[in-house]
């Protein structure tokens, strides 16, 4: 590990790549390593990246400046060419600390002559705040999405939404806060142990919000915050696809039988899903399973289990109708995006294969559908099996 690379610097450089689209293809392959980054950037690109960090992530910008100041002439020149007078207080202090160390080494530090033309090529960061995050799907099928933009009067505006492909827009809250606070929140949200979020293009997140809003149940009014801001948070450009669509475009959706079986294993392990269907559908299935214990003929646990398996098998087509199959497919797409961005590409491909299986139809032969239903009805099955054991006659004592 490079001794100069801090815990937060790779993440900060990824955010810089998202903001500086023209330099992204050079920033990302360096994987957060300051020295590798310096090798691939030309002089002007190095100044752009360092400037962006000092303006938006001053602590990480200072770390990058320190690392580059020890890397010889190219790094030192990048540090010297950033215009100190144009920086905000935190970035200016970080830059001054690095330059003080250069002076203590006998290196002459002067104001750069070409600083202003270089800075003029950068986007106006105070106007161009545009960030978005999406979380994984929880076992019920809901997920969080965040959109952050510049507030017209300064600072940042953040939209927090809770989305569900079946239940529609569950929550929508709007916060007005400082930029540093919202960046800190979003950074922390991406580092959670459970349900950590990943960054996504804002137009993709808006496309996701638009899709979920279109399926919002008409009998239930959407949250007030969403009604007020609907046109804003769901205004995706024409042709924009959701994060899941981006994953499908990048990785494909081959219906590989091996990967489909692996997807069923992920469901049974609790890694994804089970994303249950409408409660009314489940209630009908649970009633059929519970009826097994009310029959006039006493059945063994094995017999009840066999009958329960038959009931579940016969219920697959009713549970996974065309609408629910498509919604399950898009949920696997969306989960694939989160896994992909968390460097779990193989699991992402497994989820995309499951999505393809649901779009292909024939749920009776789809092991993922069966695994999802098994997990959902497991508590009912366990109760039926226990009651069968309780009803079974006790074995007689052997005669002496």
Image: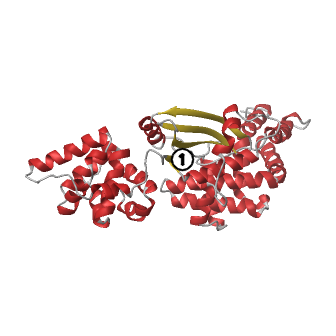
Instruction: Identify the residue at image location x=39%, y=55%.
Output: 122
| Total labels drawn | 1
The foreground one among 54 and 370 is: 54
Task: Name the image quarter holding the N terminus.
Answer: bottom left
Q: Based on the displayed image, in which of its 4 quarters is residue 398 positioned?
A: top right
Task: Name the image quarter holding the C terminus.
Answer: top right
Where residue 320 appears, as percent x and y from the top left, is 79, 52
Where residue 9 appears, as percent x and y from the top left, is 34, 49
Could one spot residue 4 in this view of the protein? no
Instruction: Identify the residue at image location x=50%, y=35%.
Output: 153
Its colouring scheme is secondary structure
Reading the image, the residue beneath label 1 is: 132
Instruction: Identify the residue at image location x=44%, y=42%.
Output: 187
The foreground one among 20 and 261 is: 20
Where residue 236 appears, as percent x and y from the top left, is 64, 53
Could one spot residue 347 in this view of the protein? yes
């Amino acid at each position: 590990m490079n001794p100069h690379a801090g815990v937060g610097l790779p993440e900060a450089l990824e955010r810089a790549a998202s903001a500086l689209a023209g330099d992204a293809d050079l920033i990302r392959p360096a994987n957060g390593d300051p020295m590798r980054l310096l090798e691939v950037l030309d002089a002007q690109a190095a100044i752009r990246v360092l400037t962006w960090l000092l303006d938006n992530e001053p602590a990480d910008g200072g770390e990058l400046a320190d690392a580059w100041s020890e890397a010889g002439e190219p790094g030192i020149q990048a540090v010297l060419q950033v215009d100190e007078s144009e920086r905000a207080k935190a970035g200016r202090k970080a830059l001054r600390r690095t330059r003080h160390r250069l002076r203590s080494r006998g290196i002459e530090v002067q104001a750069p002559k070409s600083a202003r033309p270089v800075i003029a090529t950068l986007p106006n960061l105070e106007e161009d705040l545009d960030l978005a995050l999406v979380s994984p799907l929880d076992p019920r099928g809901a997920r969080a999405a965040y959109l952050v933009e510049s507030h017209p009067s300064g600072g940042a505006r953040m939209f927090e939404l809770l989305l569900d492909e079946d239940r529609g827009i569950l929550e929508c809250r709007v916060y007005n806060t400082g930029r540093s606070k919202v960046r800190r929140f979003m950074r922390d949200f991406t580092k959670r142990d459970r349900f950590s979020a990943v960054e996504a293009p804002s137009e993709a997140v808006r496309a996701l919000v638009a899709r979920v809003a279109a399926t919002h149940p008409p009998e239930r009014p959407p949250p007030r915050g969403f009604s007020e801001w609907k046109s804003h948070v769901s205004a995706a450009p024409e042709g924009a696809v959701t994060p899941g669509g981006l994953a499908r475009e990048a990785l494909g959706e081959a219906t590989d039988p091996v990967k489909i079986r692996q997807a069923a294993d992920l469901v049974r392990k609790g890694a994804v899903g089970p994303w249950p269907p409408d409660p009314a559908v489940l209630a009908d299935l649970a009633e059929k399973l519970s009826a097994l214990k009310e029959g006039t003929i006493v059945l063994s646990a094995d017999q009840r289990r066999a009958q329960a398996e038959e009931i579940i098998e016969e219920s697959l087509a009713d549970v996974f109708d065309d609408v629910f199959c498509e919604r399950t497919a898009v949920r696997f797409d969306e989960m694939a995006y989160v896994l992909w961005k968390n460097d779990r590409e193989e699991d992402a491909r497994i989820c995309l294969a499951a999505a393809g299986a649901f779009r292909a139809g024939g749920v009776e032969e789809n092991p993922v559908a069966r695994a999802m239903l098994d997990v959902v009805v497991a508590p009912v099955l366990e109760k039926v099996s226990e009651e069968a054991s309780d009803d079974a006659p006790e074995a007689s004592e052997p005669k002496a």
